[in-house]
Image (cartoon, grey):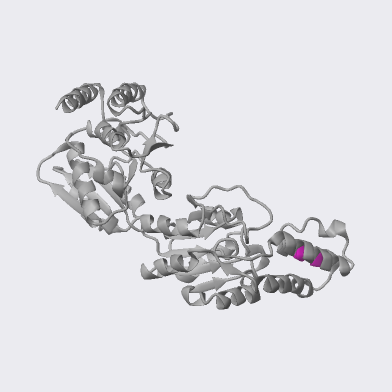
């Protein structure tokens, strides 16, 4: 993937401390009460920084004076802080791959600098933006905090990954269209309240995040294309938001139109079959190429415009996280409002036939949106040249013990894409080809 910048949260993501934020909150409450501030005005101190701003506005008390109480507690907590296992290795991995690293934290500048120096990791960060460095209305979860970082590096949001342990980290990422990684099990350093928000990717801890990034940084997209000059440009434009040109492999399967030229203009890898070998032949060529290039994840993506890149990221998720070996984007489990009935019926028949041979039912066996890890892709032997390959891949994956999951996706159909793919005649051919293949 074309990851140019990774933005980390600090507490609960890279570091922890014995003093949790619930204790910090209680000690801050005690200090405020000593200043004569009523319990009603203090409330539950959620979140602390914003509550101090409110108290200052209502009482007229100097905000910097009130804020100093919180800063003292943060620095005291920082003195006993520790790096989570794998934090330094993750930062080193990103630096080795030429990726810029920034820090976006709600901690004070004083406490943040103390932590970075204590653990000797300040050298890894190209930019550190604390709550003190942006206006109060910009502090995360407000998007201004992250926007300041993006503007500094002048990096498109789709090429940025935000790594955090809390919904407050995910909200600005989602609003600005950055990718996000949520670390779920680091309780130490986690904020004392929860915000429910979904991330693009989830891992238990920093060590798992290392493996996640290794996979993401070695993801290839295989795009089989036959006479797709009407759609290939837009498809590649969308993919290039998240993937580098050298990671996108268009297999020009003997096209007689301008498919090859248009793909080359986008700066992606173009492999050309001199004659049309069919979908199976194109996928086989693309997958072999990706494996030779060292791919850890391989995404297959149709060239006719019926897939959404956002859906591709969702299909990648379980495989990138290491929870599955093979994920299939299922239109039948998603929004099928645009899917013609004849295609739904045809898919149902082919799903049944595929399940007989695979001994596993997949609700959308003919989906062209898939993600395979390296191990699973290496075990799959493609022998079917044409549309039967979709069933064959599932049969091969099941036979070789790959963990298969389905991910709901939207079926996007235009008058152009409705003419593509399988039909009843192709369905009969697929069933016949599968039967012949199993009898060999």
In-front residue for pair 351/134? 351
* Residue sticking out furthest to the left: 274
In-front residue for pair 246/210? 210
In-front residue for pair 305/69? 69
Quadrant where the N terminus lies?
A: bottom left
Quadrant where the C terminus lies?
A: top left
Is residue 183 located in the magenta-colored stretch of the structure? no
Residue 5 point in image, percent of width and height? 44, 65
Q: Is residue 71 left or right of residue 130?
A: right
Is residue 52 located in the magenta-colored stretch of the structure? yes
Residue 412 point in image, percent of width and height? 38, 36
Q: Is residue 159 left or right of residue 24?
A: left
Any part of residue 176 in sight: yes
Residue 284 point in image, percent of width and height? 20, 43
In which image quadrant can residue 141 be found?
bottom right
Residue 345 against residue 397 in the figure, above or below? above
Number of numbered tags placed on the structure image: 0
Residue 109 against residue 39 in the figure, above or below? below
- Identify the magenta region: 51-57
In which image quadrant can residue 70 be found?
bottom right
Q: Residue at x 59, y 66 (%)?
A: 105
Any part of residue 57 in sight: no
Residue 114 point in image, percent of width and height? 61, 77
Residue 133 against residue 225 in the figure, above or below? below
In-front residue for pair 355/242? 355
Chief SS of the magenta region: helix
């Amino acid at each position: 993937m074309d990851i140019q910048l990774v933005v980390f949260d600090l507490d609960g993501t890279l570091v922890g401390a014995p003093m949790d934020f619930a204790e910090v909150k209680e000690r801050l409450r005690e200090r405020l009460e000593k200043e004569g501030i009523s319990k009603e005005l203090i409330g539950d101190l959620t979140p602390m920084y914003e509550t101090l701003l409110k108290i200052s506005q209502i009482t007229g008390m100097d905000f910097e004076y009130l804020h100093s109480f919180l800063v003292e507690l943060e620095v005291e907590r920082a003195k006993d802080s520790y790096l989570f296992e794998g934090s330094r290795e993750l930062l080193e991995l990103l630096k080795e791959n030429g990726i810029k690293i920034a820090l976006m934290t709600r901690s004070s500048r004083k406490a943040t600098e103390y932590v970075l120096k204590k653990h000797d990791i300040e050298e890894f960060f190209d930019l550190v933006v604390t709550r003190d460095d942006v206006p109060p209305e910009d502090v995360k979860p407000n998007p201004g905090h992250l926007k300041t970082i993006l503007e500094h590096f002048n990096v498109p949001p789709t090429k940025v990954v935000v790594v955090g342990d809390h919904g407050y980290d995910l909200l600005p990422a989602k609003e600005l269209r950055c990718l996000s990684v949520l670390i779920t099990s680091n309780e130490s350093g986690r904020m004392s309240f929860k915000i429910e928000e979904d991330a693009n990717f989830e891992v238990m801890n920093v060590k798992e995040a290392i493996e996640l990034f290794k996979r993401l940084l070695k993801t290839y997209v295989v795009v089989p294309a036959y006479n797709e000059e009407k759609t290939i440009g837009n498809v590649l434009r969308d993919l290039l938001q998240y993937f580098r040109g050298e990671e996108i492999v268009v297999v020009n399967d003997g096209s007689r139109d301008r498919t090859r030229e248009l793909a080359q203009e986008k700066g992606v890898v173009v492999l050309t079959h001199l004659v049309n070998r069919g979908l199976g032949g194109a996928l086989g060529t693309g997958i072999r190429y990706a494996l030779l290039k060292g791919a850890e994840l391989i995404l297959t993506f149709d060239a006719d415009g019926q897939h959404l890149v956002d859906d591709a990221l969702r299909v990648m998720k379980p495989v990138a996280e290491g929870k599955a070996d093979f994920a299939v984007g299922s239109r039948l489990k998603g929004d099928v409002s645009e899917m013609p009935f004849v295609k739904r019926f045809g898919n149902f028949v082919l799903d049944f036939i595929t399940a007989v041979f695979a001994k596993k039912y997949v609700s959308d066996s003919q989906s062209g949106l898939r993600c395979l890890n390296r191990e699973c892709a290496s075990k799959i032997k493609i022998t079917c040249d044409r549309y039967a390959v979709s069933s064959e891949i599932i049969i091969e994956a099941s036979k070789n013990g790959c963990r298969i999951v389905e991910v709901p996706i939207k079926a996007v159909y235009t008058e152009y894409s409705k003419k593509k793919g399988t039909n009843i005649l192709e369905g009969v051919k697929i069933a016949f080809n599968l039967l012949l293949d199993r009898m060999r």
